[in-house]
Amino acid sequence: MDMADLLKNAGFPVEENTHLKKDKKPLNKGKKPYKNSGNYSNKGKYPSGNKENYVHAPYNFVPFSKQVVTRDKSELIPHNSVDEQLFTGEIAYDITAKTPIFIDNGKGGFHQNMYGDYSIPGSTMRGLIRNNVQILGLSGMADDIDDYSLMYRNVAAGLSKNRYQDILGSKLKQISKDVKVTILKNVKAGYISNENGKYYIYETVPVNLGSDYGEMNYYPLSEKTIIYDYLDSERNYFYEFFDPKNNILQNEFKPRKQREAFVKRPDNNNKIHYKGEKNPKYLPYYKEVSYEVKDLKSVTNVGKPGVYSKKGYVVSSGFMNEKKVVYVIPEIDRTREPIQISEKDVQSFQIDYNKRKNKLPEKDRTGFFHLPENGETKPVFFIHYSGKLYFGFTPRLRVFYDHSIKEGLPKTHKEGMIDYAKAMFGYANDQDAYKSKVSFTDAIYSSEDKPAFLPNCSVVLGEPNPTAILQYVQQNPTKGKGSITYDMEDFQLRGVKQYWIHSKIKPLDNDVNEKIASPLHPMKENAVFSGKIRFRNLKKEELGLLLWSVTLRPESCMNIGKAKSYGYGAIKLNVKDVNIFDLEAAYKAPSLYLSPYVKVNDVEEFIHYYKETVKKQIGNKDIEELNSIKEFFVMKDSTNLPVASETDYMTLNEFKDQLRNLTPLPVASKVVSKKN
């Protein structure tokens, strides 16, 4: 079983997990452990005899704050306010790259401003510091998480296998003494139509395959049947629509010896199955046809439209190993009331597709899998189950989880609340908006020497995704539920994703598929950039929070740019100057005052003031003792890093073991403690 099969079978979208590393050696089926880069023991198959040691990632999570410090809307300071108790000024800071850094200009080169200076955009720095303000400011996260339902397909095994099979109505049916087939009793075929931006599903003309087939109203047609019919020279070819010259089957029309065409499947009790020979020119499609049916459910002829008595479409989806079936769908019935798809389901489907489309094999990006354009109608498969509608372009379609991602937030993180992050960085919603009180200049390259670059290279950039349930969702084995998924009422998200800091970059794989790789042109470590943060009308505690979010702790680093999972972009921020506008000097001086700024000599005073202020707001608790804050600083500590193997993506074998044992990703502090 290859990587794609494993991920699909596990319920994880394979296109979103291409960052998983291939094992250079096959899975060791004996008692000796397979090797990772940690310590090893022969006590079992896991490193150091601990089954959790194989679960690791280049990222981890800062838990969501249980307490959210809210602000009343009346506390928001008008931008035209002039008040001696408010602070206006700027923070000048330096960024030192501790590892090579790459800020992409969108064309594979290092970012430059309009004057040609190498720089880190102000928007990049704003996003970085705002994230720190949210965590250190105990802010709500509801407005930063999209409210949509994830989708998954679970073909054979994994976290939601039983749930998935129930939705599809998957049942084994005995069709002869020695043959059983899987019937998807809840899956129907129809047609999805885009009518002025609204999506509707139309049913087919009525089809009755018998009670054993449930809602099923389409005809699976084996490619083996088509090919053998063509290769049998003693009779006519009844499936002339599938002309070998058109390359529209997943298998080639090549005669094979009986011993070659049929093979044993060791993973299925050595059952014999048809293997065939892969057609490299195959693309997924749906095409209009005519056809004939015998005994209610057996398609005997398929030809061009108008040749046979029945009308419909042939559908053949994306290539899958050992998938040897096309589907014949009866014609549309526009006399019946169509089913309107909710806007929320359309949005969730589109988000899911957009996350996967660029990672599909290039030749499969034919438009087969996307929603129809306005005025377009195309075949679809759909399910009505427990009051919910599921739809997709193959019978084993991707289905929605019962709950959206946002439902996994703590109840204290409510939408629309005002907190420190919104009061400082602004917000906009359907009701009102508030302008940001902070702005960021570009951080310009300011080292004395000319910038030095590493050689150009390419890297496959894996993007962590919430479909990795054992990473993103809190697990609680003590409840006896096994793995907690988005289908469960009480599921909780792990927190805010953060990448680990690295002391040096990791070696890149020389054997990179350039079609899916991203170019890197990294600047060498020790490069220095200088930037400014301008602020207006901040309260003293807000300025303290902003300064804390910039300075963190002496041992802290942050990371920005591309390839953070490989160690690129570790940076250290150093505040050079904090200057505050002196309102009294500027407006009450007897003559023109050209330098109305006062330098802040004690940054820690403002930070301490914020900590004391928030301490009163959270029941006299020390903010630095909160779990979310402690875990945040664990991940920023450049002096106490995890061992290198704990910040790699898992190999395929490790990932397979994680799914088998339902072992979650350890929390950040536990990852660091492993080396001790």
Image: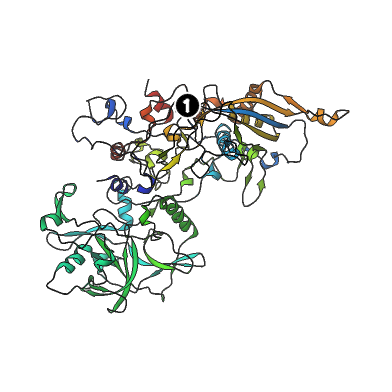
Image quarter of the C terminus: top left
320 versus 376 height, above or below: above
Q: Nearer the viewer, residue 132 or 169?
A: 132
In the rendered structure, the answer to whether residue 601 lies left or right of residue 373 reads right
409 versus 183 height, above or below: above
In the rendered image, residue 630, in percent from the top left (x then y), is placed at 50, 27
Q: Mark 1: few, some, or many residues within 10 Å (few <14, many ≥20)? A: many
In the rendered structure, the answer to whether residue 224 lies left or right of residue 594 reads left
Q: Is residue 23 visible?
A: yes
- Say which amino acid is labelled 1: Val
- Which element type, helix, strand or loop, lies under badge 1? helix
Q: Which residue is mark 1?
A: 634
In the rendered image, residue 374, in percent from the top left (x then y), is placed at 49, 66
Question: Looking at this rendering, what residue extends furthest in the front direction?
Answer: 450
Q: Nearer the viewer, residue 85 or 536?
A: 536
Question: Looking at this rendering, what residue extends furthest in the right direction?
Answer: 590
Say which residue appears at 22% left-offset and 63% top-offset.
223
The image quadrant of residue 246 is bottom left
Q: Is residue 398 visible?
A: no
In the rendered image, residue 212, in percent from the top left (x then y), is placed at 24, 65
Question: What color scheme is it?
Answer: rainbow
588 versus 225 height, above or below: above
In the rendered image, residue 112, in percent from the top left (x then y), is placed at 57, 39
Q: Nearer the viewer, residue 546 or 245?
A: 245
Say which residue appears at 11% left-offset and 58% top-offset.
258
The total of numbered circles placed on residues is 1
